[in-house]
Amino acid sequence: MSSNNSSDLSDLQIRDAKYIWHPYTQHATAKTPLPIVKGKGALLFDENGNEYIDGVASWWTNTLGHSHPYIAEKVYAQMLDLEHLIFAGFTHKPAVDLAERLMKHLPDNQAKVFFSDNGSTAVEIGVKMAIQYFHNKDINRKKLITFENAFHGETFGAMSASGDLGLNNAYSEHLFEVIRIPEPYKGQEEKSAQALEKAIAENNAYAFLFEPLIQGASGMNMYAPAALDRLLGICKDNGVLTIADEVMTGFYRTGRFFACDYLENKPDIMTLAKGLTAGALPLSITTCTQDIFDAFLSNDKHKTLFHGHSFTGNPTGCACALASLDILEREETIQDIERICTRHAEFKAHIEKHPKAKDVRQQGTIVAVEFLTSTETSYFNDLRDKLYYFFLENGVLLRPLGNVIYVLPPYCMTDAQLKKIYGLIERALDEIA
Ligand SMILES: Cc1ncc(COP(=O)(O)O)c(C=O)c1O
């Protein structure tokens, strides 16, 4: 178990503490990180053989279970053939195969894929594509429109595009200005649509960037496809590009392959990461329409998209994503996804009457319970740490977003594992809220 008592620490924990700075961690107060030595299916095992159910799919990445042997084999085989290659001026089969395979799943207006290696940079690239699309056509467009409580990542563009969740206070003066509109949550669809129309009328907007159907980091806040469709329609009518950030929602997380599969209007640009490789290797993709790609074609070299990371198009990552697609496309995987959606729906129906549950929401394989607290719902709610350690002590990894607890499992999670998580959430509502 995590501890702050130095005599209880393992050798690995002592060595970790000497040099390592962990993400999203306040090292002054956080308990020592838990060393994990093995992952199998939905389970993680620590140094002492204790097991933990991974209820957050290792930061929303893991779709098919840990250390999947089929994925490991394909990655190993690729590494023996060609582990990495500069992707400017060269190409390779895994990248071409992956682009072709993804096209079959993407909305039919998507025509090109651009590789990078994490969700934040996929967003940066999408925003850069939109800015330069207009620049290359000599059209003056200045502003990005986003949702008030959006989260798009941690690079400067992604932080600028994200809402004020309290995570970026130190950098706020250094971020570029965006126009924020309210999310079209139930009951405020009209307000959101009007705000978008006003934002477009008053600003020279190049794009509207959004998390489709679920605002993840802000607390798994959900809104209906029809409301988003209306916003996309407004953008299309006004020549504003639309960017769907599917970094969290892609690869069946919402019950369909992409969240955008619930929409009539299709986005111009999409960003994919996390589940792209089943969570096994870092790889991300930004896709766009032919029209956007064509705006970069010119004899003038300045019209090039000057973007490319060292690991752009990494063959091992592409082979991993192809292996993931092999499994995702199997009938039994679809059945598992449907099973999890059904179990979540049953749990939601059961728990939503609990007096300490302020709200229970579900979209596909994600179910979230907002705990009733005396303080405001926020990422910094005091309940967060109590809940986090309560679940960990009981063998379950859940990472509350403030007072919102959610389950976002690998699709191989068994009914028994789900039942254990649901039972613990109910106990937490009874005993901790
Ligand atoms: C919607 C969304 N976009 C972008 C990101 C950033 O992805 P990454 O952490 O891979 O940079 C995240 C991460 O949680 C996300 O949820």
Image (tube, rainbow, N blue to C red):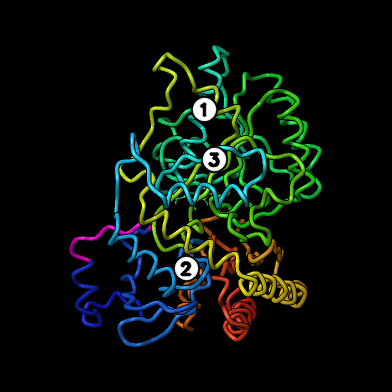
Residue type highlighted by circle 1: Glu
In the rendered image, residue 239, in percent from the top left (x then y), is placed at 69, 23
Residue type highlighted by circle 3: Thr
Residue found 75% across the figure and 78% down from its top: 350
Mark 3–mark 2 distance (CA, rounded to whole Å):
38 Å
**Res 287 label:** 3
Vertical side of 204 occupied by 50: above or below: below
Magenta residue check for 86: no
Name which quarter of the figure residue 149 lies in: top right
Tell me if residue 200 can be seen: yes
Label 2 crowding class (10 Å Cα cut-off): few <14, some 14-19, many 20+? some
* Front-lying residue, 290 or 425: 290
Q: Which residue is mark 1?
A: 177
**Res 102 label:** none
Discs 3, 2 touching: Cβ within 8 Å:
no
Mark 2 or 1, closer to the camera: 1
Extent of the magenta region: 17-24
Secondary structure type for disc 2: helix
In the rendered image, residue 345, in percent from the top left (x then y), is placed at 74, 72
In the rendered image, residue 45, in percent from the top left (x then y), is placed at 38, 81
